[in-house]
Amino acid sequence: MRKIIVVLMVMACGMVSAQTAKEIIDKNIELTGGLTNWKLLNTVMLQGRVTLGINDEYPIKIYQQRPNLTKTSIIVGKKETAIEGYDGKKGYAMNYANNKIQEYPNYTAESFDNDFIDWESKGFEAKYLGKEKVENTYCHKVQLTKNVNTSVYYFDTKNYQLLKEVKKDESLLYSDYKKIGSLMMPFRIESESSSSKKDSDYVILINKIETNKVFPDNTFRF
């Protein structure tokens, strides 16, 4: 009898954890604009400044279009120069050795939406990992897993905003949320590499976000 009770308790804990993870994700989506409004989002253009490493700072523009088109450009001497992107078929990134953008065969395009939007239909499993502080803020910690890929998300326990995302190769910190139309978006994004090398770290301070803007046809040509 004791073994049966223990097994039932373990099963119940697993069910509560899965339900809690779903509730947290649903709460984030609801309080940041709602699932319908996120799905109506088709393009985003962000403008601001990026600090690379320690001292290199540039004006930056980021273009994103559903389902996975993207281009990141820096402005040097009033000239916009693409440094990374995906045109729908091929990925590109700047080769700083010869200062030219080039095709990368193994480039992995990221989805336009966060993984936790429609995470169940995408084949992810969600697990609640408890609470943990991000700087001085207590957060719900939720893990999403698909095959061998795992990401961990930290949602503010008070307003359910996403404050941190941990991937295989980097950690992303989100802050300074502001409302753009019906959606809440971060205006500060900080990246830290998981490797000992910090030359790929960056901080983006956004000063303008435009949504559902119609981009010229050549926007994602490299």
Image (spheres, rainbow, N blue to C red):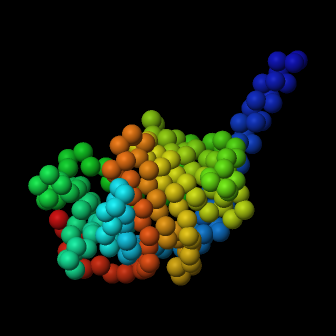
Residues 43 and 179: in front is 179
Residue 73: % across, % down: 27, 68
Residue 31: % across, % down: 65, 69
Q: Is residue 26 left or right of residue 113?
A: right
Query: Measuring 27% from the left and 61% from the top, which residue is drawn there?
Result: 85
Residue 130: % across, % down: 70, 43
The reply to whether residue 105 is in sight is yes
Give the farthest residue toward the left.
98
The picture quadrant where one finds residue 16 is top right
Q: Is residue 27 left or right of residue 214?
A: right
Query: Measuring 64% from the left and 67% from the top, which residue is drawn there?
Result: 30
Residue 150 vs 201, above or below: the answer is: above
Q: How many marks?
A: 0
The picture quadrant where one finds residue 164 is bottom right
The picture quadrant where one finds residue 155 is bottom right
Residues 15 and 171: in front is 171
Give the farthest residue toward the right.
1
Which of the image's four quarters has the C terminus? bottom left
Residues 139 and 115: in front is 139
Query: Measuring 22% from the left and 66% from the top, which residue is drawn there?
Result: 82
Query: Measuring 67% from the left and 56% from the top, which residue is drawn there?
Result: 136
Q: Is residue 93 left or right of residue 115?
A: left
Residue 47 vs 108, above or below: the answer is: below
Residue 207: % across, % down: 44, 78
The reply to whether residue 67 is in sight is no
Which of the image's four quarters has the N terminus? top right
